[in-house]
Image (spheres, rainbow, N blue to C red):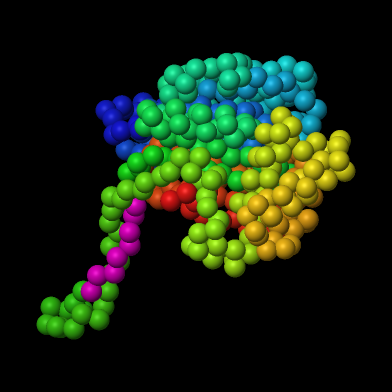
Amino acid sequence: MVENNEMELSEAEAEQYDRQIRLWGLESQKRLRASKVLVIGLSGLGAEIAKNTILSGVKSVCLQDNEKLRETDQYSQFLAPPDKLGTNRAEASLARAKALNPMVEVTTETKGVDELPDSFFTEFDIVCATGLKQEQLERINNACRDCNKKFLCGDVWGMFGYMFSDLVDHEYSEEIVQHKAVKRGAEDDEKNARETVTINVKRRAIYVPLQNALSADWFKPELRSRLRRGDPSYFVMKILLRFRDEYNRNPDPAKRKADTEIIFRMRDELVKELNLPAGFVSDAILTDVFGIVSGAAAVMGGVIGQEIVKAVSQREPPHNNMFFFNPVKCVGFVELYGQ
C-alpha cells in the first residue's frame, strides 16, 4: 500500500494536476505520484485502463502483453496505430501512452505472465490484469495478497464486462456531510435553523481473494435469495471464463455460430450444476459476447481506472468486490461475493 509520504510535487506537477488536487486533495495526489502500477493485457480494455491511470498522475505504469496486435484490436485499441499490426501490443502502444502524460514513466514487458516470477508482480503497488485465464488470475492475486499489494482484474466480451477488486485490508477516508442545528439569533433558544458541515471519516474495508469470489456457494440461502433480482451477470462471467480456460481464447466473431453453441452448452451445464431457474441466463445476453465493443471498453476502463485511483489515493469508498455491466439492461452494479 502506498502510505502518506514526504514526496513533494514540483511546480509543473502542481499545475498539471491542479484540478485533481482540488477534487481529492494534495495528500491523495502525492500518494498517486508515488505509486507504481502494472496493467496486464493491452486489448481495448487494457488501453482504456492504461490511459486513465497515466492521466491520473501515478509515478509509473508498466504495460505487459506478449500478444501481437491484430486487426480486430483496431476496433477498440486506440493506443496502437494501424501500421503496428503484427508487432507486440504493449510495444505498439508505448509511444501514444507516453504522450498522454510525459510526467509518468511508461515501460513495457513483453514476456507472458507464465514466464514471469511472482516477485515481478509484487514490485508494483497495484496490479490490474485483463485477458487471463482463471488460474493465472488467481496465481497473481495470491502473490499480491502475500505481499499486501492491491489487485484488480476485469474483462470485456462484446458489450458485457466485469471487474473484481482485492485491496486486502484497505483503509480510506470518506467525506461525510452532516447537518448541525444552529440558533437563529443571540436571544433565540430555538434550534430550527441548520447548517451543513463536511467532515473526513476514516474507514476500513476487508476484501477476499478472487478464488473465494469465484467459488461462491449458490446453495446458501443468502446467495440464493439474490436470484430474485433476476440478473445473471455473475454466471455470464463464469461461463466466459470457462470458455477461455477450455479453448485458450475468447469467443471468435469468425466462429460465431460454433462458439455460440459452445457457450449455450456451457450455460446449460452451469444451470444444471447450480440448479438455477430455467431461462435465468438468457440467450440474449450470451449472443453479444464476441470481440470488444469500444463503448463497453470505455465504460469498464473508466470504472477500473477510477477504482485504481481510489485504491492508491485512499480517498472515497472503493467497490467491494465485483462490478458488472449488463448490456441487455444497460446497467452497471456492484455485488459482494465470497464472504
Of residue 261 and residue 3, the one placed in the foreground of this image is 261
Q: Which residues are magenta?
A: 173-181
- Does the magenta segment cover residue 177? yes
Q: Magenta span: helix, strand or loop, mainly?
A: strand
Q: Seen in the image, is 306 located left or right of residue 178?
A: right
x and y percent of residue 46 in the render? Answer: 62, 33
x and y percent of residue 89 in the render? Answer: 68, 22
Say if residue 80 shows up in the picture. Answer: yes
Q: Seen in the image, is 256 located left or right of residue 53?
A: right
- Does the magenta segment cover residue 155? no
Q: Seen in the image, is 11 located left or right of residue 68?
A: left
Of residue 172 and residue 244, the one placed in the foreground of this image is 244
Q: Seen in the image, is 251 located left or right of residue 339?
A: right
Of residue 80 and residue 141, the one placed in the foreground of this image is 141
Q: Please tell me which residue is depicted at 50% across the width and 59% down the height of the picture.
A: 220
Q: Quadrant of residue 207?
A: top left
x and y percent of residue 24 in the render? Answer: 38, 45
> Relative to 111, is 37 above or below?
below
